[in-house]
């Protein structure tokens, strides 16, 4: 509930058989995608169209000299906020919190940040179209969905990357952008463990030329532009791949099933769910499951549950987003108020979908437990504890932490001067700060 | 000379600790201030300090060279980017020293490896303390439980992590419990190896708030990306740095305040539309360093600010009007203590055979030589201490003449 989930809620009974409860969450399609609320959110293509319309309206207003502040409400920002509210709200309410943790884990593995590429409105569609459908599926399918999604293509600058010898490249003297080629190898798949060269990065970038975006291409907005694609075969890590869209797909299939990919993924999964210093045996076990199943992510998630090391409580420090969600869940909240929630996450040090760099947010406790960050959490706890509620603090503590609740924390909560102080003490207790 | 200087430092520190008076502290040689600004994401050195005198520049990067009328010339061969107007004023005052064609000892083009190596100060992955933290270990203890180091902004960067305690300052906008509740929370966490010490140290640092910012609440840092309308998002990196720099400068200026601070700025990874996007973080850097000068007041004369990035970017423009990961780049020293008003560089040239791997500006200087030179001059550290701060760097001699005598 805490190690693999997002913390207890007063309206959700603790599972009788935790292991069966966790494994049961891995069955069937993503439950959020089946809700009417998610179904009403825009596709990647619709978000691209809205962004284009925003740009045109802004230009027109600038030309006519109108005040942007008064007349211009960007649709892209509204879309970002609607998706943020939907996905945070779902994480607060969900009865399948392990599955939701996997969604956020893979979203961080394939980071798209609004800090670059004008992607804010596209990150929601990215999570719904490229991440959620594949969290219990095949890793290769997730890689293909991710690297072809407009959010990633714009974030890492591939949408405008042109083969130097392609027709567009020759005519307009434009060329390559290596960014996606490099990061899809280093961060998304084989990692630096694979020992590839700068030439391999260039080859991968060339294989991905022409992978671009188009608002008319429903549903996700991906479009392959053959005239921008680098002609000729490319040699990537000793293998030759043909030109064309199929060549890039084949290269991604190769990278996503390369042996160092299994180690890289297993290390990150075990670090996230078990310990900052991932035990080698646990990593080897999960990597073995990934290799044996050729990237079955459901099997990898189940393997994590089976690790005895994963059941030692309190070894991990919650990230700010996990902490924010667990406080909201303990208070029984059912929706995230946006933009207020976004401001809180920012002040906690982890603004939503805005990681500084493509390697995403850190999964190491040391990066989240500096004095400033811890005091920000305490002040957040105190702020949230002031929200009105009608449940007794001790009951909230028991529902949130179950057997993890220490006697001295329960005593402090029970004898505090006010409900607000009681809840602040609960949320700032070490067993609540950890998972 | 260096050994006796170190002994003097230690002696004064003892006085300071025993006496516990401001006078003793003020008399200690740690009046020197040292600020490191980490530009995470790889600054394009040839866009920040443009080698317009090199005949090959225009051939390699058409479309990445600001017009001569807008840039700030530095004596005929180099010029500062148009967004660096305040840097130019510092240069004119002899307080800015750009060091060009410089790189760390590593040759990886991975941001993440290189940023770690930049901060640990070594050539190989594996070290887990930062060189700024090790510097603090070489300085006399000052009796302040918060330490003399300060991390500016949320999150302690690796460069400041290690055995020595460091403080932290970041403006926050949450309600704050009263003293009693903080104490009770501290007690609940007392047995926790991470949260116990962090809370104690954080509360120690809060006195900065009370003493320095009693006048009003801290304005919020910006909400990353959200101010940008549709279209290409403006990088959030530079925003907020000037405000944070002004506040941290005030802390550094105080007679009993911290002496060493580190900032980390983002927004430098300009693969796309570099000419349109880079001015924002550059302007933030420009205003932030100027804000530090104002806030430091008289202490600026004893201050050295070191601006560094993990590596440079490709010499050629890429296919999306940006640049990809490279090697050699520029670093800056700024401050009243700096012997500036000149560009320090052994310019490698930009012909194909002169480029590193026919791709990047070739490095002709080592960032560790620059850092060692600054630390030697600013804190009087000798070769042994510098060797502990930068292990395995015996072959890298400290640069001389960086600071005013």
Image: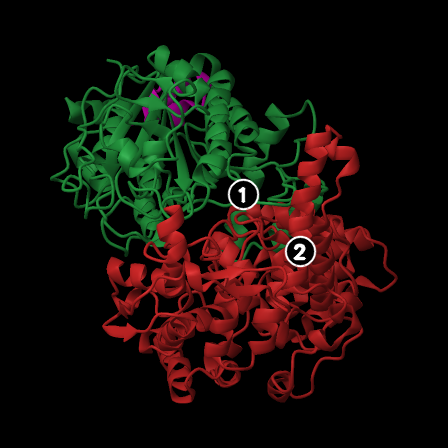
Chain colours: A red, B green
Residue A179 screen position, x and y as percent: 40, 55
Residue drawn 65% across the image and 78% down it: A30
Residue drawn 71% across the image and 42% down it: A57
Q: Chain of mark 1?
A: B
Residue B210 screen position, x and y as percent: 63, 28
Label 1 secondary element: loop
Residue B396 lies, with reference to residue A409, above or below; the image says above
Does the magenta-highlighted stretch encompass residue B11?
yes
Residue A211 screen position, x and y as percent: 46, 63
Horizontally, residue B247 falls left or right of residue B214, namely left
Label 2 secondary element: helix
The quadrant in which the N terminus of chain A is found is: bottom right
Horizontally, residue B135 falls left or right of residue B285, namely left
Residue B48 screen position, x and y as percent: 37, 30
Q: In whole angstroms, how far apart are the C-alphas of marks 1 and 2?
A: 36 Å
Does the magenta-highlighted stretch encompass residue A430?
no
Q: Nearer the viewer, mark 1 or mark 2?
A: 2
Q: Chain of mark 2?
A: A
Residue A389 shows up from this direction: yes
Check disc 1 and report the residue beneath it.
Answer: B154
The reply to whether callout 1 and callout 2 are in contact (CB within 8 Å) is no
Residue A274 shows up from this direction: no
Residue B26 lies, with reference to residue B270, above or below; the image says above
Q: Name the mark on residue B283.
A: none
Task: Identify the magenta region.
Answer: B10-31
Residue B301 lies, with reference to residue B47, above or below; the image says above
Closer to the camera in the image, A259 or A361: A259
Closer to the camera in the image, B276 or A394: B276
Q: Main SS type for the magenta part?
A: helix
In the picture as drawn, the residue positioned furthest to the right comes out as A390
Check disc 2 and report the residue beneath it.
Answer: A49
């Amino acid at each position: 509930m805490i190690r693999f989930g997002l913390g207890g809620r007063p309206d959700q009974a603790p599972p009788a058989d935790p292991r069966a409860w966790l494994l049961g969450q891995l069955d069937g399609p993503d439950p959020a995608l089946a809700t009417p609320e998610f179904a009403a959110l825009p596709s990647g293509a619709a978000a691209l169209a809205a962004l284009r319309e925003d740009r045109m309206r802004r230009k027109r207003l600038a030309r006519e000299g109108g005040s942007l502040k008064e007349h211009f409400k960007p649709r892209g920002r509204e879309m970002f906020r609607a998706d943020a509210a939907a996905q945070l709200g779902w994480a607060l309410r969900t009865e399948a919190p392990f599955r939701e943790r996997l969604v956020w884990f893979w979203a961080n593995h394939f980071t798209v940040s609004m800090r670059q590429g004008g992607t804010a409105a596209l990150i929601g569609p990215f999570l719904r179209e490229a991440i959620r459908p594949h969290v219990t599926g095949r890793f290769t399918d997730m890689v293909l969905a991710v690297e072809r999604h407009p959010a990633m293509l714009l974030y890492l600058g591939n949408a405008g990357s042109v083969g130097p010898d392609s027709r567009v490249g020759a005519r307009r003297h434009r060329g390559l952008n290596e960014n996606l080629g490099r990061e899809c190898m280093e961060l998304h798949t084989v990692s630096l463990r694979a020992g590839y060269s700068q030439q391999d990065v260039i080859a991968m970038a060339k294989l991905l030329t022409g992978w671009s975006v188009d608002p008319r291409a429903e549903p996700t907005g991906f479009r392959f532009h053959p005239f921008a694609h680098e002609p000729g075969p490319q040699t990537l890590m000793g293998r030759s791949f043909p030109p064309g869209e199929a060549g890039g797909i084949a290269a991604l299939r190769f990278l996503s099933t390369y042996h160092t990919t299994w180690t890289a993924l297993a290390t990150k999964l075990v670090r996230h769910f078990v310990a900052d210093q991932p035990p080698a045996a646990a990593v080897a076990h999960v990597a073995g499951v990934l290799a044996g199943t050729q990237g079955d992510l459901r099997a990898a998630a189940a393997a994590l549950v089976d690790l005895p090391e994963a059941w030692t409580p309190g070894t991990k420090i919650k990230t700010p987003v996990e902490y924010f969600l667990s406080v909201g869940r303990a208070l029984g909240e059912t929706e995230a108020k946006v933009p207020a929630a976004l401001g809180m996450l920012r002040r906690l040090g982890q603004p939503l979908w805005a990681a500084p760099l493509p390697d995403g947010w850190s999964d190491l406790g040391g990066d989240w437990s500096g004095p400033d960050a811890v005091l920000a959490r305490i002040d957040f706890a105190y702020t949230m504890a002031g929200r009105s509620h009608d449940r007794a603090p001790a009951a909230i503590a028991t529902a949130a932490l179950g057997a993890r609740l220490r006697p001295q924390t329960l005593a402090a909560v029970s004898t505090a001067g006010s409900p607000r102080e009681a809840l602040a003490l609960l949320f700032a207790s070490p067993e609540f700060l950890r998972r | 000379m260096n050994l006796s200087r170190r002994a003097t430092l230690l002696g004064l520190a003892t006085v300071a600790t025993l006496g516990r008076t401001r006078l003793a502290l003020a008399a200690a040689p740690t009046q020197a201030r040292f600020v490191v600004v980490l530009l995470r994401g790889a600054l394009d050195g040839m866009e920040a300090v443009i080698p317009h005198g090199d005949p090959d520049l225009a051939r390699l990067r058409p479309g990445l060279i600001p017009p001569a009328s807008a840039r700030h010339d530095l004596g005929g061969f180099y010029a500062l980017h148009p967004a660096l107007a305040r840097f130019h004023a510092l240069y004119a005052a002899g307080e800015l020293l750009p060091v060009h064609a410089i790189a760390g000892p590593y040759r990886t083009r991975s941001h993440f490896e290189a940023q770690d190596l930049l901060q640990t100060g070594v050539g190989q992955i594996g070290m887990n303390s930062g060189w700024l933290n090790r510097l603090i270990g070489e300085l006399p203890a000052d009796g302040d439980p918060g330490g003399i180091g300060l991390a500016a902004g949320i999150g302690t960067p690796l460069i400041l992590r290690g055995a020595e305690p460091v403080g932290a300052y970041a403006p926050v906008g949450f309600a704050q419990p009263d003293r009693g509740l903080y104490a009770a929370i501290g007690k609940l966490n007392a047995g926790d190896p991470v949260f116990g010490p962090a809370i104690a140290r954080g509360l120690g640092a809060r006195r900065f708030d009370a003493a320095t910012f009693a006048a009003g609440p801290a304005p919020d840092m910006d909400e990353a990306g959200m101010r940008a309308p549709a279209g290409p998002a403006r990088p959030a990196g530079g925003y907020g740095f000037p405000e944070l720099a002004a506040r941290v400068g005030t802390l550094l200026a105080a007679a009993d305040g911290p002496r060493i601070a580190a900032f980390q700025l983002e927004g430098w990874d300009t693969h796309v539309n570099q000419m349109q996007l880079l001015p924002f973080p550059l302007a933030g850097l420009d205003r932030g360093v100027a804000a530090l000068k104002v806030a430091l007041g008289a202490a600026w004369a004893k201050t050295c600010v070191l601006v560094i990035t993990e590596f440079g970017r490709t010499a050629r423009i890429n296919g999306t009007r940006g640049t990809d990961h490279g090697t050699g780049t520029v670093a800056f020293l700024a401050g009243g203590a700096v012997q500036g008003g000149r560009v320090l560089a052994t310019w490698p040239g930009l012909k194909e055979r002169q480029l590193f791997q026919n791709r990047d500006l070739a490095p002709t200087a080592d960032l560790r030589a620059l850092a060692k030179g600054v630390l030697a001059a600013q804190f009087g550290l000798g070769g042994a201490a510098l060797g502990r701060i930068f292990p395995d760097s015996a072959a890298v001699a400290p640069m001389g003449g960086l600071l005013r005598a």
